[in-house]
Image (cartoon, rainbow, N blue to C red):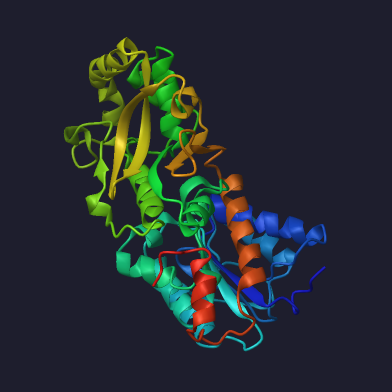
Amino acid sequence: MMSPLSSPARVVLFGCGGVGVSLLRQIIRLQQNTKPYVPVVAVADSKHIVISDTGFLDIACMEWIIKTKQSGAALDADTPTGVKVCEVEEGADMLLGSSHPAFNYIFADCSASADTAAILVRAVANGNAAVTANKKPVSGSMETFKALTADARRFRCESTCGAGMPIIASIARIHRSGDGIRKMAGALSGTLGYVMSGLEAGTSFSAVVKDAKAQGFTEPDPRDDLSGMDVARKALICARMTGSNIELVEVKVESLYPKEFGPEHMSVDEFMAALPRLDKGVKSKIQMAASKGEVLRYAAVVENGSCSVGLVSVSKESPLGRLSGTDNLFQLDSECYSPNPLVIQGRGAGTEATASGVLADLLELCDTMPASGAAAVRCTENECISKAFFPFTT
């Protein structure tokens, strides 16, 4: 087993919610089972960061962090020995300003904050690396996206689009091979997949949304799912992976509720009470699709340089048409994958699946990133390595 001191990388984790806690558990399990060692040097929540004084956090300290966050306490309360606690920005400055020459830091973003983007960009720029399950840094400005993906040896974002599903890697490999990608489409929300399956079975829109919320499939405010913005971010990332210079505002998004049902007009309780008013309209769309022998799916479509998200009517026999439940599905049509598309289907959400995708990205970066923490020197060889994963970079 690799010891923490022989590993070329140190992990700095941002985010102590469900995904971050699951990732810590998976790292602990690796260490206990003498698998590849992933040394964690620091863990941050939205306010504080815990940094090891000894080079890495041991299992007992990581278990303390898990217990502390699950209890709802702050990371600056009753800290164990061997660590220091400070505000996140101060801690990031400390780590990024004193990179040890024998290893790099890998900043793993399991938060849902837009504020981490600047830290990730800074980390990659000064020769460290970053992994993100957080969609906001890679679906923000093109400037930020290009800065993050400039050197593929230092960045991974697989879990942004389908938890542990290999969507990003598949797009990159096919695009790099020169196989012309004609169209990408996918049902990239387990919540909306569940809603669509319920509608197909004859359940009213209001009833299936209430059921999904009761089972914990939706966000506390279901409009966060029904607005389509989460899917829009995923579609945007897929589009950008093929070289499209698209901003989020350019993605066409169809919300499953009208503007007057929005958060600025209704509370969550008022929204849930008003849902039956939408049943008739949704039912008519379901019936229209059925009259053509088709079914409705909420899908992202990337084609001809454009990106759209919303309801689509598809054949019952198509990959999207056969999809049911909370699974995600991504399909890609290209010169080689025609007439039968490449189809990737599976669990595309959930804390464990997402954390597993992040961990796989971390381990891959540990294998491929340079041993030195110094900023990378751009050269032909480096650019070729970078294009192996992000072939659109220049």
Q: Which of 192 and 222 is in front in this view?
A: 192
- Using the image, determine if residue 359 lies above or below residue 213: below
Image coordinates for residue 134, horizontal then vertical, percent = 45, 57
Looking at the picture, does residue 208 appear above or below residue 23?
Answer: above
> Which of the 4 image quadrants contains residue 136?
bottom left
| Residue at 41% across, 69% down | 393
Q: Can residue 219 be seen in this view?
A: yes
Residue at 70%, 81% in the rendered image:
54
Tell me, yes or no, if residue 70 can be seen here: no
Who is closer to the viewer here, 306 or 202?
306
Quadrant containing the N terminus in the rendered view: bottom right
Image quadrant where one finds the C terminus: bottom left
* Residue found 46% across the figure and 56% down from its top: 178
Q: Which of 264 and 230 is in front in this view?
A: 230
Number of marks drawn: 0
Q: Which of 220 and 165 is in front in this view?
A: 165
Left-right relation of 56 to 232: right
Residue 182, horizontal then vertical, whole percent: 37, 44
Q: In this view, does 105 lie to the left or right of 161?
A: right
Q: Can you give x and y, in whole percent of width and height, for residue 161 in the image?
A: 46, 48
Question: In percent of the image, x 58 and y 76: which residue is there?
Answer: 105
Query: Residue 82's spot in the image, x, y percent?
Result: 69, 78
